[in-house]
């Protein structure tokens, strides 16, 4: 790629201490270089955010929101460029990349329109108690590689509107769209309000334990989330953790097996299955099981698995080699325990391609059922009793999302009420909206993002309790 990328620190685009390769997952070859920070550059970025905070937090919210809207406009104007870069670094097909970029624009605009009004808690007998919400200070935003740009916006939008400053650190395998967005921030925002730094999975801990970071907004795996929480504990920092999931789809017996299979397929295979709330295991009534599995296999075989930048591609590569190896190991194990109806082996070509794979006849304790596969591989399990299948769906340390499918919506909703997850969708999947709170139950997260509740997460209560001066 014939352009350079720089980090944004204190309003300036700066080189790293070193650089590293960014790999195109469709070829397995390097296509760009990324600047890498060191401890001194992380310190500089945090110091810049800290310096910017007093003026930014004192700026009227209407002005801050107007600048966030301006960022949305600038992103929309260059959406094509962002989508192409996203496909190159992440692998997803171009139409899905464009969807992510436009979703990012929508998210910024949604937050620019949100306000938290002071809340009068008491006004009686000369006593006025008002709850104000004040910003926290410097937010470290740490993001993963599956949705690099929109997951940054989920943090940046609410953080900036509420008056915080930010140091953002993207995942090392997908840093470029964040750096490109940093260029927009450099043009539009006062210096230091947003800083973007890169690492190779080695500087996150410096950020989360930094004494001048007040909040950590983290999206990533549950294993790393635990480390983030431990590290943030030293400063009693605020944390929000958006972590892993192993979402179950429960199909009820009043639907046509093949019709519902088509919907479930979409929820499992979008973004090559690399979605925290992808359908990661499907439970189907015994009489529908064979037809459901066969229809999924048909769809899997029809998929166009190729470079995401090629017109017509429906499933792109796995984003990085480590994840590719992990999915392959799960497949090797599943092959010995169940029946693979479609896919099952990596494509014999450069890049990290695994075709959509449907596995049936696995036990509940198979690793592909218990673990988060994060790839285009769906295990399908049989059930005969609704109470038992709800127990099986809930038998997981995760509790991020889930779906229930049924013609009788009231009955499906009753089942959804019994799934122990932050969000359960009925007859739809992935209906995430910047205006609706999103958060994980159990080990899928702590606190959350989006909606007004997500805005609150970037503030603290400031209670002012006043009475008239009493003459002694
Ligand atoms: P990861 O945990 O490996 O990495 C996430 C980020 O944390 C990266 O930027 C990484 O550099 C950084 N990091 C690594 N070590 C760190 C440390 N010790 N301290 C601080 N930061 C550190 O996750 P990933 O593999 O990039 O992403 C996939 C995971 O993210 C999946 O489990 C997926 O379910 C989850 N995810 C969750 C949500 C959600 O909203 N709940 C959304 C998307 C992805």
Image: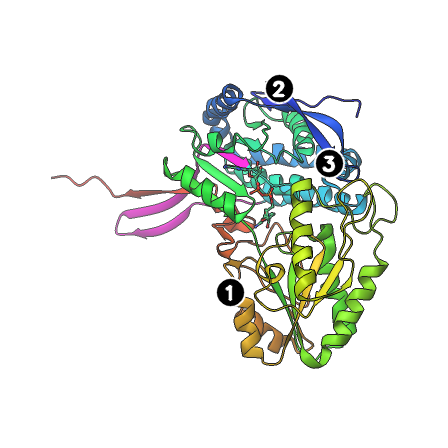
- Secondary element at image label 2: strand
Q: Are marks 2 and 3 in contact (CB under 8 Å)?
A: no
**Pointer 3: what residue?**
89
Q: Is residue 394 above or below residue 349?
A: below
Residue 16, can we see it?
Answer: no
Quick one: quadrant of the N terminus?
Answer: top right
- Decide: is 250 above or below 23: below
Q: Which residues are magenta?
A: 114-141
Q: CA distance from mark 3 to mark 1?
A: 35 Å
x and y percent of residue 182 in the render? 64, 28
Query: Residue 366 shows which numbered tag?
Result: none
Q: Please, which residue is most extreme toward the left here?
A: 472
On the image, the x and y values in percent for residue 28 come to: 76, 36
Provide residue 364's location: percent of width, then percent of height: 58, 68
- The residue singled out by tag 1 in the image is 420
Residue placed under numbered mark 2 in the picture: 18
Label 2 neighbour load within 10 Å: few <14, some 14-19, many 20+: few
Q: Quadrant of ligand 1?
A: top right
Residue contact at pointers 2 and 1, CB within 8 angstroms? no
Mark 3 or mark 1: name the one nearer the start of the chain: 3
- Label 3: element kind: helix
CB of mark 3 near ligand 1 (< 8 Å): no
Q: Confirm whether the magenta stretch covers residue 125.
A: yes
Nearest the eye: 118 or 322? 322
């Amino acid at each position: 790629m014939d352009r350079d990328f720089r980090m944004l620190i204190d309003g300036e685009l700066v080189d790293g201490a070193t650089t590293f390769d960014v790999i195109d997952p469709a070829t397995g070859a390097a296509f760009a270089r990324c600047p890498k920070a060191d401890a001194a550059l992380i310190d500089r970025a945090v110091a810049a955010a800290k310096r910017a905070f007093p003026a930014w937090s004192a700026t009227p919210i209407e002005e801050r929101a107007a600048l966030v809207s301006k960022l949305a406009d600038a992103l929309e104007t260059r959406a094509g460029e962002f989508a192409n870069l996203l496909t190159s670094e992440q692998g997803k097909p171009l139409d899905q990349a464009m969807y992510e970029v436009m979703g990012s624009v929508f998210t910024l605009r949604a937050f620019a329109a949100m306000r938290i009004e002071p809340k009068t808690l008491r006004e009686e007998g000369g006593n006025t108690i008002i709850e104000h919400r004040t910003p926290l200070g410097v937010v470290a935003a740490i993001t993963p590689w599956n949705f690099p740009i929109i997951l940054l916006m989920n943090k940046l939008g609410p953080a900036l509107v509420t008056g915080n400053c930010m140091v953002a650190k993207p995942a090392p395998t997908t840093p470029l769209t964040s750096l490109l967005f940093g260029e927009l921030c450099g043009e539009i925002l006062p210096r230091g309000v947003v800083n973007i730094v890169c690492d190779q999975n080695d500087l996150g801990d410096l950020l989360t334990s930094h004494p001048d970071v007040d909040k950590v907004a983290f999206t990533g795996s549950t294993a790393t989330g635990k480390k983030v929480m431990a590290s943030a504990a030293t400063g009693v920092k605020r944390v929000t953790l958006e972590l892993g999931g192993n979402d179950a789809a429960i199909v009820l017996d009043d639907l046509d097996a093949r019709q519902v299979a088509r919907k479930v397929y979409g929820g499992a295979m979008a973004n090559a299955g690399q979605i925290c709330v992808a359908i990661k295991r499907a439970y189907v009534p015994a009489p529908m099981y064979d037809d459901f599995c066969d229809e999924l296999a048909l769809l899997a075989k029809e998929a166009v698995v190729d470079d995401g930048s090629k017109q017509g591609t429906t499933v792109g590569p796995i984003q990085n080699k480590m994840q590719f190896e992990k999915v392959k190991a799960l497949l090797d194990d599943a092959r010995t325990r169940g029946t693979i109806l479609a896919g099952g082996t990596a494509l014999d070509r450069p890049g990290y391609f695994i075709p959509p794979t449907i596995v049936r006849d696995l036990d509940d304790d198979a690793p592909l059922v218990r673990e988060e596969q994060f790839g285009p591989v769906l295990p399908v399990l049989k059930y005969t009793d609704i109470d038992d299948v709800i127990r099986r769906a809930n038998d997981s340390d995760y509790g991020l999302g889930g779906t229930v499918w049924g013609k009788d919506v009231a009955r499906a909703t009753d089942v959804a009420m019994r799934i122990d997850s932050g969000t359960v969708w009925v007859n739809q999947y992935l209906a995430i909206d910047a205006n609706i709170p999103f958060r994980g139950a159990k080990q899928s997260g702590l606190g959350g993002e989006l909606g007004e509740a997500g805005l609150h997460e970037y503030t603290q209560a400031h209670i002012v309790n006043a009475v008239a001066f009493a003459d002694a």
